[in-house]
Image (cartoon, grey):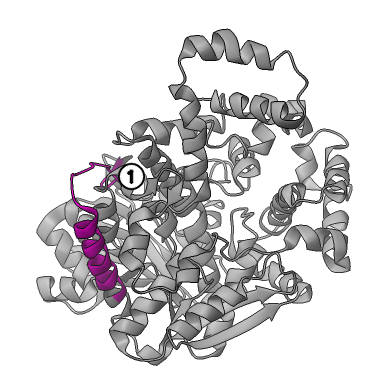
Amino acid sequence: MILGGLVLADPSRRMEPGVMRAMTGGPAHAGEPTWVGCGPFGVFVRGSGPVLSETPAVVVAAHADLVNLTELQDLTGEEGLPGVIARLYERDGVEAMRRLRGGFAVALWDRATRRLLLAVDQFGIRRLYYASTAMGLAFASRASALTPLSPARHGVDVSSAYYYLNLGFVPAPRSIFAGVARLAPGHRLMTRNGQAEVSRYWDLTYTERSASAAESAETTVRLASAAVGLALEGASAKTTGAFLSGGTDSSTVLGLMRRLTGERVPAFSIGFEDERYDELKYAELAARHFDAAHYVHVVTAEEALAALPALVEGYDEPFGNDSAIGTLLCARLARSCGVTRLLAGDGGDEIFGGNQRYATDRIFARYQRVPALFRRGLLEPALRLFPEVGLVGKAQRYVRRASIPNPRRFYSYEFFFAQEGHSFLAPEFIRTLEADAPWALVEEHYHRVAASAELNRLLYLDMKLAIGDNDLLKVTGTADLAGVAVRFPFLDLPMVEFTTTWPARFKVRGTEKRYLFKRAFRPLLPAATLAKRKHGFGVPTSSWLKTHAGFVALARDTLLAPDCRVRTYMRSGALEQLFALHKQDETPFYGSILWSVLMLELWHRRHLSAGASA
């Protein structure tokens, strides 16, 4: 599934189909492209998702799943998605994108003004990339479609590779390809006098309002129910199901689906033989509680290994989130049962305050309330007199981390290659990096957001990075590969915008996470679900990289090969050291790093090898 196009730099030229032929590469199953040319503008769609249409005023290409399509059809008098978008544009101009709710990537050519409008949804459910080329401005929903036209054809942006090594994904507005940028969530691009102008049309703002907990809880349930109701529209109850990890968000979505439809909801869960990663007991608890039609599959290492080629092919930028394996297999399970749309609980942690590290950061923030004179003049010098062992060692580590200002403290246990793992990197690679990467982007997000509470700044960071750049790519990418649509009720605009008005104490009170959420949904959810620790679709890849012959062989044969591309980023012997550290470590820490590096190498081999077309 892909859409793409080009605006020629020479406005007197007319677009010819052959000009864009190089851009139409993609997965073999995507089908033949459909084209439209209009003066210097050309656009194509390929696959079952994107749509393309033209009116006397505009040409519209869109890959969209709008939850408020019925409302917009009534407003515009149009039936089809392109017609709705075209009429909204004629009515509201570029502000029309504000009316769209759900996932979308839109390209619109205005015939009269000869201007291009590109826009993506507010949260990053769908993506668009763009590049200035010798021929003109090119755009596509897959970054690799632009590389044949890019001046830096098939080149890697080295700083983006460094961001990936630290994050496990490439954050917007970057892409892994040199000369190619990604349109960030909530942004639009317009061409003016042959130049591209990117602007933000929507963003989160945290304006806390005084309200009672009881009133806010009631409104939360109402908005969540409305969001799930919209997500259910346009599909039969028998072909619409739910991802079910057994956590609070997926269980809440399932419960609201059951309440609204009055029917047994198909729910899909993935488990593992390794009990450290298996959460099926909580999924089964929720399924029983809501009388769901529960479908379960216990994934073997062999199945996970067999799924890797599809993931490497499907993600044309490196993607190191290993839970994509479980999500893909869960989506395939749903499709095999006749389900064509899944509802997911992603976004709940980031709007309700559900991640443990929000509570953890509050513990570290308390240290700053101690008078500075006492901290720096007495406590810290005294602690430095003792070896870092036992309780004193814990105190020293606490003080060290608590003394780091946010947002760096928030990521002080992450960004391995930017911190303690910096020595693994090749000096020549380090010299090519942008100054202060990867911290610059994190600090830009942190300082830009309109928020008075520290907690809300951290939530904003996670909405931008964890949700917009990581989780949504994982879920939509795997759902696309499995042939199912996916919707995210907790990312419905009214739901999200309402939670930005909550006092921060409604999200995390002391060290209690989801304070108001628990109050709102206690009548709906099993008590054990509300009490459980967050887990999600974790995958035992770290263990498999030690114990499973197939994974061990893949990792060692790939990363220790003489032609390993990742070696250009690493100092001599670093990969061998990483294997040794992983072997000695009883935690998944080095295994997750090894997995991320492995996925980068597999991406290199598939998408940058000579003659490969993405």
Task: Indicate the position of residue 374 as horizontal and vertical percent values.
Answer: 51, 12
Relative height, residue 390 to residue 40 (above, below): above
Q: Nearer the viewer, residue 220 or 490?
A: 220
Relative height, residue 185 to residue 250 (above, below): above
Q: Residue at x 24, y 47 (%)?
A: 501
Q: Which residues are magenta?
A: 199-228
Quadrant in which residue 581 is drawn: top right
Q: Residue at x 44, y 74 (%)?
A: 526
Relative height, residue 462 to residue 374 (above, below): below
Q: Nearer the viewer, residue 333 or 513?
A: 513
Amino acid type at mark 1: Arg
Residue 587 seen in this snapshot = yes
Quadrant in which residue 50 is drawn: bottom left
Relative height, residue 76 to residue 352 (above, below): below
Task: Indicate the position of residue 177 as horizontal and vertical percent values.
Answer: 57, 46
Which structural element holds mark 1? helix
Residue 29 seen in this snapshot = no
Graded by Cα atoms within 10 Å as few (under 14), some (14 to 19) or many (20 or more), the crowding at tag 1 reads some
Q: Which residue is mark 1?
A: 505
Q: Nearer the viewer, residue 16 or 224?
A: 224
Q: Residue at x 71, y 51 (%)?
A: 592
User: In this image, 305 relative to 412: left or right?
Assistant: right
**Does residue 212 show up magenta in the picture?**
yes
Residue reaching furthest front? Answer: 391
Quadrant in which residue 492 is drawn: bottom left
Quadrant where the image shows the C terminus: bottom right
Task: Indicate the position of residue 66 as horizontal and vertical percent values.
Answer: 29, 70
Question: Disc count in the image?
Answer: 1
